[in-house]
Image (cartoon, helix red, strand yellow):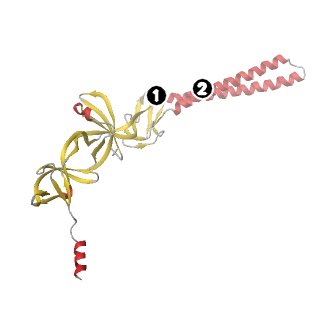
Amino acid sequence: MRLLLLVALVATGPALAEPLILDWSAVPEMKAVYGTVEARDTIPARARIGGTVVELLVSEGDRVEAGATLATVRDDKIAFQIAAFASRIEALRAQLAEAESDYARGQSLVQRGAASQQRVEQLQTAVDVIRGQIAAAEAERAVIEQQQAEGAALAPVSGLVLSVPAVRGSVVMPGEVVASVGGGGFFLRLAVPERHAADLAEGAEIQIRAGGQAAAGRLAKIYPLIQGGRVQADVEVDRLPDAFVGARVAVDLPVGERRALLVPAAAVTTRAGVDFVSVAGAAGEERRAVLTGESLAQDDIEMVEILTGLAPGETVIVP
């Protein structure tokens, strides 16, 4: 019975402490900057013909698919031109019917010897000429109908409508912007002071705080042109909030490294508002009052920076 009780006490007792020899660790130096949400492709949807905006189907903030109609521009002169071609084609078809009738009559006269072959060939030429005129008129009418169809301003890409400068009833010229669409995905654009340009590296991991939540990104591109004392850089972020293009997002940018003393968060205990760390001393385990700094993850372990109270080479006891 005593043996069983001893085994139970050992099994339920506290975990054994592990020693950790304190040494300097390289910690990335972070700089807090702001980035703006930008669309990868911002393409204007332009009016292809001049006329009056008779229909406006989108407004700022709408999501559209590529090829969707955003607005309709109408030019009344085009409808008149189409009607004129329709009348012209109708008249030519009447002439064609008469010419074909004369040609058929001429063939019958040739068979009876009452007309010459030359006259029949002339009638055949007249039929061919009218048919060519009808084909040319139909082609010209197709061009005008295509111009009428180009009155629809189409979305160039799938994405978010950023601005709609046109209004219903306004007159637009060919090539004038009806709406601007942002698509192709969204990213963060940073403007970093040039003194940190040499410390930036493409592919570096970036921490951002968007919508009150932390997320990780990657420094995808650093632009070589410095403007206004700042370097532009692009950060790719998964599931970046894109409700507001141009919104500012807080970013922690790595701009170098510094030395720090790090201990596992489990080694720090707080008593009466003071942080303590257990270290191995000459007389055994002793508690040392410390001043802690920021927390960071290292190899999936939460670590705490020790600002004062410990020195490299000391043995920290980690529960």
Along the line of sight, which residue is nearer the eye, 175 or 290? 290
Q: Amino acid at mark 2?
A: Glu
Few, some or many C-alpha atoms within 10 Å of disc 1 (few <14, some 14-19, many ≥20)? some
Residue 50, numbered label: 1
Q: Which quadrant of the figure has residue 131?
A: top right
Which tag, 1 or 2, sits closer to the chain's start? 1
Q: Left or right: 140 with respect to 173?
A: right
Count of marks, rendered view: 2
Q: Which quadrant of the figure has residue 80?
A: top right
User: Where 262 falls versus 88 (above or below)?
Assistant: below
Along the line of sight, which residue is nearer the eye, 19 or 146? 19
Q: Amino acid at mark 1?
A: Gly
Q: Residue furthest right?
A: 112
Q: In the rendering, at what x and y percent does residue 314 appear?
A: 15, 52
Quarter the N terminus occupies: bottom left
Q: In the rendering, at what x and y percent does residue 47 appear?
A: 45, 31
Q: Are marks 1 and 2 in contact (CB under 8 Å)?
A: no
Q: In the rendering, at what x and y percent does residue 135 appear?
A: 66, 26
Q: Which residue is mark 2?
A: 140
Please say whether residue 93 is visible from this viewpoint.
yes
Quarter the C terminus occupies: bottom left
Along the line of sight, which residue is nearer the eye, 42 or 298? 298
Residue 184, numbered label: none
* Residue at image location 44% in from the left, 27% down from the top: 175
